[in-house]
Amino acid sequence: MTKQPSDKSFAGMTSLASEPGVVAWEPDVPQWVAVVSIVIGVLGILCWGGQGILAMSMQGVEGVDMPESSRGHLLFERFGFIAATLLGIWLIVAGAGAAGGSSWGRTAIRSWAWIRILLAVIGLIGVFYWFDEVLSGSLQEVQSQMDQAVAENATPAETPTITESAMRAILTIWVVAMSVAICVWPVVVLIVTRRKSNA
């Protein structure tokens, strides 16, 4: 009898490594992206959500000196807090799905990235639309600190002072820098999770 070649390995198990075309499974979203996304989502809820709750709870409280905002600006701020909190929850769910290898994980996390960039642009436009109110509030806060320093008999060198033009420049740089920083992770997500060409 002719002895047939055997493709069985130890204990009769077929060796998959010897079969052509068999490749290791790779998730659509790298695990490090999923984990970092979950962390950023949690931080987003704690920071934006907590800040929003604090800001809304301080409105109308007696004895609290807060800059007055127009109704439109106030609604815009609340929209930003709520949207950021919901996006944080979305990112946690999308990151968890991506970490588990779910088929919808990549779609969910990429959708989050596009919406986050869009809201960052809307937020930047809104800030500059109500820039005079933001500037006025910042100057009012500085003036409050100056009054407090004077009341505590601080020396002129210890008294905080700033001109309107300087404050305007500082706020402009800060707002633009924050908007760019917010878009960094969404851009990373879109680059890393893009479909690779088979060619």
Image (cartoon, rainbow, N blue to C red):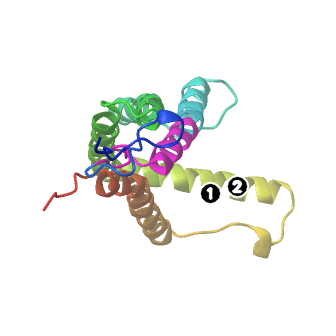
Three-letter amino acid code at disc 2? Gln
Label 2 to label 1: alpha-carbon separation: 5 Å
* Picture layout, residue 166 above or below residue 133: below
- Badge 2 vs badge 1, beta-carbon distance below 8 Å: yes
* Residue positioned 43% across, 70% down in the render: 169
Q: Is residue 105 above or below residue 25?
A: above
- Local SS, label 1: helix
Quarter holding the N terminus is: top left
Q: Position of residue 83 (x, y in %)?
A: 39, 31
The image quarter in which residue 81 lies = top left
Asked which quadrant contains residue 116, the reply is top left
Name the residue at 53% across, 43% down.
35
Residue 71: x and y in percent read 36, 29
State yes or no: residue 160 in magenta.
no
Residue reaching furthest to the left: 199
Tell me if 185 is positioned left or right of 126 in this view: right
Give the magenta range: 22-44
Q: Name the kind of residue labelled 1 in the image.
A: Val
- In the image, 9 versus 116, the foreground residue is 9
- The residue beneath circle 2 is 145
Residue for badge 1:
142
**In the foreground, 25 or 89:** 25
Tell me where residue 150 appears, x and y as whole percent. Answer: 79, 59
- How would you rate the neighbour count of disc 1 (Cα within 10 Å): few for under 14, some for 14-19, many for 20 or more? some
The front one of 41 and 85 is 41
The quadrant of the picture occupied by the C terminus is bottom left
- In the image, residue 98 sits, relative to residue 86, either above or below, namely below
In the rendered view, tell whether residue 91 sits above or below residue 154: above
